[in-house]
Image (spheres, rainbow, N blue to C red):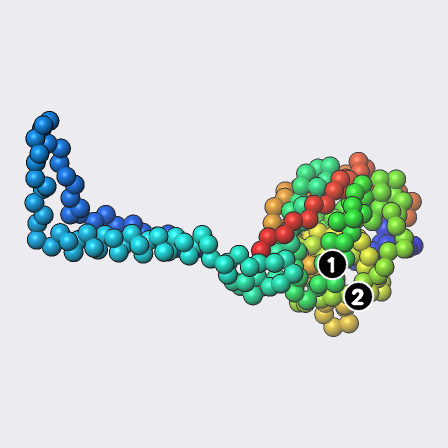
Amino acid sequence: MKVSNGMAAGIPAGSGPGLVEFHTHQGLELRQPTPSGQAGPAPARGPGSGKKIAAVAAALLLTVAMLGLYYFNPWAARKDTGSKHYATGELPETIAEIQTSMGTIVVVLRHSGVQATVNNFLSLASSDFYNRTIFHRVINGSFIQGGGYLADLSLKNSTLPKIKLETTGIKNLRGTIAMARGTDPDSATSQFFINVKDNPAYDPSGTNPGYAVFGSVTNGMDVVDAIANVNTTTSGDMNYVPVVPVVIDHIVVLERG
């Protein structure tokens, strides 16, 4: 893919289950020790002591039943990664840890409405495609872009399949991750960017197709900000290139239901 002014992926410049409460029941009587060699009578039981013991037994049975339901609930165990979450009806969250030379950025990926985009990202991450790619375009106060070039500024793969633009109305707010692309809305491949500030210019509106937001940073925004503040330079026809390469070492994919 031909790079023009660093715009190969052209972005416009610029409470679980409630706690079981246990109650103490009084009136449960124990036999008292007797002097050695003597047989003593059992302590006298006061009126209603039998009912109290029955109440204690019933409470214990109820407690055991509730704990059994909590720990051995078969419905709660039926969560498979290919179906919707049994409790919320939502697809399980997918977590990606973007491990870089400057620290780790953790993002939660959306599924609804951008499934093809997420599948493409996960496929590339799982195949280690992103290993050794860099954040090649860093604009302080706007975004950091990476996932396509190596440290020598060669394109890692120029024949990746393009994916169709998917937008769902999720805005390009600070901390969101979106796919980078060329002038063709359906030209995204591997490159992505993380918004350092709210970027409404990248949202779809009118004749502007916008950029596909497919997740958001949940931890490591300080790393994003640090990357955004590195010194940059121009190299050939690429602008805003970090002087010291910021390398994506690996992207680890996790999933939680």
- Residue found at x 74% / y 63%: 116
Amino acid type of the residue that numbered disc 1 sits on in the rendered structure:
Asn
The x and y percentages for residue 30 are: 16, 41
- Residue found at x 90% / y 48%: 237
Residue 145 seen in this snapshot: no
- Residue found at x 21% / y 49%: 25
Q: On screen, 182 above or below 95?
A: below
Label 2 and label 1: CA atoms lie apart by 12 Å
Badge number at residue 119: 1
The quadrant the C terminus occupies is: bottom right
Q: Residue furthest bottom?
A: 206
The x and y percentages for residue 13 are: 79, 55
Task: Say which residue label 2 marks.
Answer: 164
Q: Regarding mark 1 in the picture, which secondary structure is present there?
A: helix
The x and y percentages for residue 55 are: 21, 55
Residue 9 seen in this snapshot: yes
Amino acid type of the residue that numbered disc 2 sits on in the rendered structure:
Lys
Whether residue 256 sits left or right of residue 24 in the image: it is right
Whether residue 5 sits left or right of residue 137 in the image: it is right
Badge number at residue 54: none
